[in-house]
Image: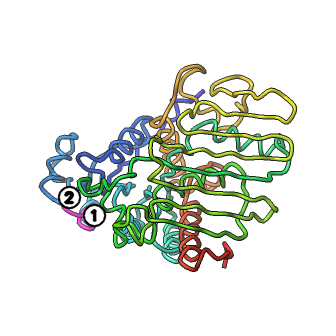
Amino acid sequence: MFNEEMRSEKPIRWAMVGGGRGSQIGYAHRSSATRDGHFQLVAGAFDIDANRGRDFGVNLGLDASRCYADYLTMFAEEAKREDGIQAVSIATPNGTHYAISKAALESGLHVVCEKPVTFTVVEAEDLKRIAKAHNRIFGVMYGYTGFQMVHQAREMIKRGDLGEVRVINMQFAHGFHSEEVEKDNPGAQWRMNPEVSGPTYVLGDIGTHAFYLAQLMTDLDVDTLCCTRQSFIKSRAPLEDNAHVLMQFTNGAVGTLWASGVNAGSMHQQKIRIVGEKASLEWWDERPNQLSYEVQGEPARILERGMGYLNNDDSAVSSDRIGGGHAEGFFESWSNLYSRFGIVMKAADREDQETVNSTWYPGIDAGIEGVRLLERCVDSADNDSKWVKYHE
């Protein structure tokens, strides 16, 4: 069971860039970060409209003087204060992530950033170098990886319950953008603008979530891949609203990734299915408290979160916040991640590298692999879906 007594140290003084009024993701960050006492929101640069951002921050209970017009001003002014910010979360469009993250790290701040963290692997690796040089934690908000049954799957695969992994099917395919919703939806507009979103739409926006979940569960590395992508809403070209990726892994396994915003009628359909030589596992984010475990020749079984037959000695699985049978969901997953971010940030500040190294959290390496996937998929799709090496 989750240990709420971990809040033995003062909360980290924390700020946000982006995530202002009307932002669902901004609310998710604030609700999850502050839940367990690891973080306290004290400042923000919430909006490109300074007045609107200040009004929003004041309504959150912040001092108006700490609601800034832009992130550079915030970093500079907060650095002058004895009680200045120690960490920042970045919830802005993709094209701004690199510059904001770089400035934050160079200002001595820990960072939690939305994904994809950058447009290129070179930029992402640069952030890793800067974070290491300043002894700062860089967390990437792969928000679904805080679910306990994802880590249950990871432990079962590591233990050999499936035997050698043969097939990995990944998908995140919703239907909310099956029409040209971006005409009237600012949140959709920037996702479909290559200058802001980057070289992909659905692959970067949702495909990277499914890909990282599979990476986390299996620890397998991609050898080669090929990608085909489409813009069924023609105005979205050159960005795709549907994509299929074939993968070959270094252990001989094969995989598929389907990312789509035009799967009409679908809510999420984010499913990860791992097929081994003896058994298979399947996790679906719309039923996150359950894990399907299917052993060849035996009845299929559903494993439930919070039950004693799970790997409760594992620190991720034992983050249950309430007993089995009660539904935990999206905010619990995010809170589990922010709790881990808080633990490693505090450990880094006191130079406790052992705790940093022994605590799992989605860090900059996870961010780098997400960007690498996008680069390789674009390279393949834009060259007649040729097979490309994952690591150049």
x and y percentages locating residue 204 in the rendered image: 48, 62
The residue tagged 2 is: 68
Circle 1: element type? helix
Mark 2 and mark 1: span between their CA atoms?
7 Å
Closer to the camera, 125 or 240? 240
x and y percentages locating residue 9 in the rendered image: 46, 40
Circle 2: element type? loop
Which contiguous range is marked in magenta?
Answer: 68-76
In magenta segment, residue 185: no
Residue drawn at 72 percent across, 40 percent down: 281
Asked if 77 appears above or below 38 in the picture, the reply is below
Residue 90, quarter of picture: bottom left
Q: How crowded is mark 1: few (under 14 residues within 10 Å), some or many (20 or more)?
A: many
Asked if 208 appears above or below 6 in the picture, the reply is below
**Residue 363 visible here:** yes
Residue 42 placement, left or right of 227: left
The residue tagged 1 is: 71
Asked if 316 appears above or below 194 in the picture, the reply is above
Residue 159 placement, left or right of 349: right
x and y percentages locating residue 102 in the rendered image: 41, 70
Disc sitting over residue 153 in the figure:
none
